[in-house]
Amino acid sequence: MSKLRVVHYINQFFAGLGGEEKAHVRPEVREGKVGPGAALEAALGQDAGIVATIVCGDSYYNENLDEARKTILDMIKQQKADLFIAGPAFNAGRYGVACGDICKAVSQELGIPVLTGMYIENPGVDLYRKDVDIIKTGNSAADMRNAVPAMAKVALKMVKGQELKGREDGLLEKGIRRNMYRDVRGSQRAVDMLTAKLSGRSYETEYPMPNFDRVDPNPAIKDVGKAKIALVTSGGIVPKGNPDNIEASSASKYGKYDINGVTDLTSDKYQTAHGGYDPVYANDDPDRVLPVDVLRDMEKEGVIGQLHRYYYATVGNGTSVGNAKGFAMEFAKELKADGVDAVILTST
């Protein structure tokens, strides 16, 4: 039997080109294995080989979805691949979105098995888990030694037509329910789980519930007319030119901007960096997303004590929960230290 022809997709970082400064690299094909492909090929064994590696910058893919997808599909067709593997992307948001998108396209257009790997909080998971098989990985590339063998094992099962067993194979759930027969009826299994829980023994639920983060509200401000109010936005309003290069999708950073003396956000000085909504109206009048003008009026009228001189901005489009929480933990300390009493968080 001839070796299975595998095409591997990686981003600019794992290809050794560089980090953010090379994130706009266009798709290119390299012969054979590159970077983590060496470990992947070894894990796949003698029956499969990586015939080509496709490299694309994270920003380029996410900012040119249609073009990047079409270009890479053509590259894969030329390789006559039997199997396509992307990543693993771990918790890199734009990389995860690219892996999920191209895997979905390859599956639908070329009809060959596809597989990727991501951390549960990667935005690519929620976007593509229903369409693509995704191996659950750790948060960072430090988990590469565990992720690659798990991906290779499942990939080989896929090309052999063997049944995948969800969590047992390390896959993230797709949220699809199927009827099946069990040796023990549901009521008995439920009682067994309850008694295990009550006695402190380990058990595993058959229907894991989503874990939503809940925040208890703080007490209401007693006198808003004396309060210092700060603005925070996930709507991407930044000074003209986006000086901190906040990504249009899957943001990895936020910005802190001084609005001391600013009474109106004008289109010649501010813009939106957000890639998830039509920017025309926000760019025309950035106050539509970040209402500095209204709060200045309220400040003059004594409705609020004062508007804090700094605002914080990021892009919520595809940004992971982990990153968002990390941003907030950082600037919340600054807001408290600056004596801010309340925050108005605006979105899109």
Image (spheres, rainbow, N blue to C red):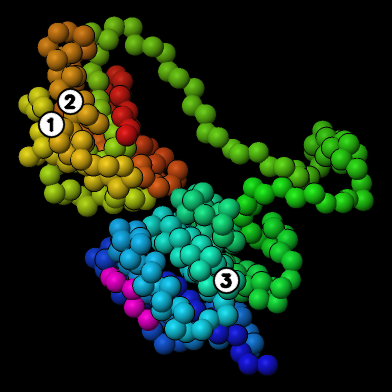
Q: Position of residue 314 (x, y in %)?
A: 29, 42
Segment tinted magenta in the rendering: 25-29
Query: In the rendering, which numbered label is found on residue 292?
Result: 2
Q: Which of marks 1 and 3 precedes in the sequence?
A: 3
In terms of depth relative to the viewer, which is nearer, 77 or 221?
Answer: 77
Q: Are marks 1 and 2 in contact (CB under 8 Å)?
A: yes
**Disc 1 target residue:** 265
Q: Disc 2 versus disc 3: distance between alpha carbons? A: 51 Å
Q: Amino acid at mark 1?
A: Leu
Q: Which of marks 3 and 2 precedes in the sequence?
A: 3
Query: In the rendering, which numbered label is found on residue 111?
Result: 3
Instruction: Confirm whether residue 348 shows in the render.
Output: yes
Q: Which of marks 2 and 1 precedes in the sequence?
A: 1
Q: Main secondary structure of the magenta part?
A: loop
Q: Position of residue 303 (x, y in %)?
A: 21, 9
The kind of secondary structure element at disc 3 is loop
Name the image quarter holding the N terminus: bottom right
Q: Position of residue 109 (x, y in %)?
A: 51, 69
The local crowd at label 2, few if under 14, some if 14 to 19, many if 20 or more residues have their Cα within 10 Å, is many
Vertical position of residue 138 compared to residue 209: above or below:
below
Indicate left or right for 255 with 214 as reference.
Answer: left
Vertical position of residue 308 compared to residue 30: above or below:
above
